Amino acid sequence: MNHPMDLTAAVGGLSYLNPHAPEPWASFVEQIERVRPYLGELERWIETLKHPKRTLIVDVPIERDDGTVAHYEGYRVQHNLSRGPGKGGIRFHPAVTLNEVMALAGWMTVKNAAVGLPFGGAKGGIRVDPASVSKGELQRITRRFTSEIGLIIGPDRDIPAPDVGTNAMTMAVMMDTYSMNRGGTATGVVTGKPIALGGSLGRQEATGRGVYITAREAGRRLHLPIEGARVVVQGFGNVGGIGARLFHEAGAKVIAIGDHSGTWLNEGGIDIPAALAHVAAHGALLGFAGAEPVGIEDFWALPCEFMIPAALEGQITAARAERMRARVVVEGANGPTTPAADDILTDRGILVVPDVLANAGGVTVSYFEWVQDFSSFFWTEDEINARLERIMVQAFDAIWQVSQDKQVSLRTAAFIIACHRVLEARAERGLYP
Ligand SMILES: NC(=O)C1=CN([C@@H]2O[C@H](COP(=O)(O)OP(=O)(O)OC[C@H]3O[C@@H](n4cnc5c(N)ncnc54)[C@H](OP(=O)(O)O)[C@@H]3O)[C@@H](O)[C@H]2O)C=CC1
Ligand SMILES: O=C(O)CCC(=O)C(=O)O
């Protein structure tokens, strides 16, 4: 079927994040296409998933501290709302593009459906380097952006959360701005907030915890215990840093870590609390004395049991996949593996736990936060972690089963389950008017 707006063509090309990787939206569309043969009657709705429902591009002007006026481009994409309000994070990064935000929103649709959360998929971002602006400027950017996307977000419409370059403080400012504009306190408009503003215990750790749980489940299937396993982690922020800490605490040997400032190796095992303390003090791993620098291509080729990409998209390319010596890749990041690399890893017998499952712990506890805000009744951290564990293990089991039954990768299995749920909801809501 021809669609008047061929978004794949409009925003195609190669990724800015990695010139050897396709643009993220093209990767997402290819992943959707791979599910087509498994959709049965629902196949007639598949184009729905290849066209975001709503895309808002906003101009974010602010007065800088020196009196000049600066403009930043921001986006909120609601990829699909068939199963519930939009849900997905906000990214502040100097290279954010519409193409990337569209793909990230699409992955949220699939992720939320794959783990059974009652949400559609959305994502947002601003093309800004948070490190290049003052605290006051960042707050003004966040407030103006929130007011602009206030047209389409809301506790029952679309609920943002943190992603790369944003955190609980960003969410506090977003919640405050939205509430001021509406004339009341709307805690449920964002998740990942500080605890004092209706945030949930366990949310900050949740994505890393989900990565750890799914790695452990994959390890069980392959008889690879976490204790003593060699782990490599790219990205040492919220997801990678906390994920590395949980592996370390469980007795794994985290042998290599990296962030934008470089990659480091210590085959005896890195002291992860010391590395986290270094980043807290210096803002990056650069200068960390507990490991030796290692070249980026050697980093990806390190022999290990678990490789955890937890930075950005397009990192595991076909060339890197050919050289990788991991047993399992657990995708903490969204979209770190290109479709071509995915096939190579599968052919080489390297198990990939896909992003839409592996990093779903964050949005799962965001869901808990949203529920707690609505009921104004807050749970203990033990309750939250127990519910998270249950949802992640159930989702892993279901996806594993489909992958075994249909002899497909875990990614395609997750997409089969998710696309069925989304398109069934679409079909049951009836035909477009
Ligand atoms: N936060 C969450 O709850 C969730 C996040 N995710 C995904 O996880 C990934 C990481 O997000 P999060 O941890 O929140 O983000 P953070 O901003 O907390 O951390 C990002 C990390 O990636 C590093 N990084 C950035 N660019 C590069 C690069 N080119 N090469 C190597 N490392 C790089 C950063 O290094 P530096 O600090 O030095 O710039 C930092 O260590 C993203 O793909 C995100 O979409 C998925 C689900 C939920
Ligand atoms: O917590 C959320 O709502 C979304 C987290 C997110 O952006 C993601 O899972 O990629």
Image: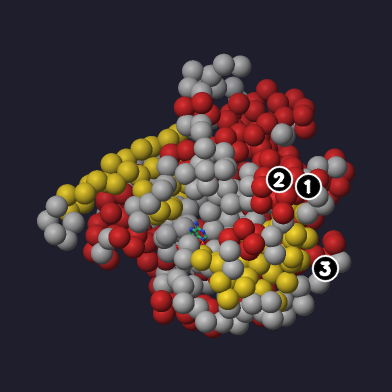
Q: Nearer the viewer, mark 3 or mark 2?
A: 2
Dot 2: element: helix
Dot 1: element: helix
The residue at the point 77 percent across, 77 percent down is 228
Horizontal and vertical percent position of residue 124: 43, 47
Horizontal and vertical percent position of residue 169: 37, 66
For marks 3 and 2, give the CA distance. 21 Å
Say whether marks 1 and 2 touch (CB < 8 Å): yes
Which numbered marker is on residue 342? 2
Say whether marks 3 and 1 touch (CB < 8 Å): no
- Disc 2 residue type? Asp
For marks 3 and 1, give the CA distance. 18 Å
Which numbered marker is on residue 224? 3
* Residue pointed to by mark 1: 346
In the depicted view, which residue is nearer to us: 331 or 159?
331
Q: Nearer the viewer, mark 3 or mark 1?
A: 1
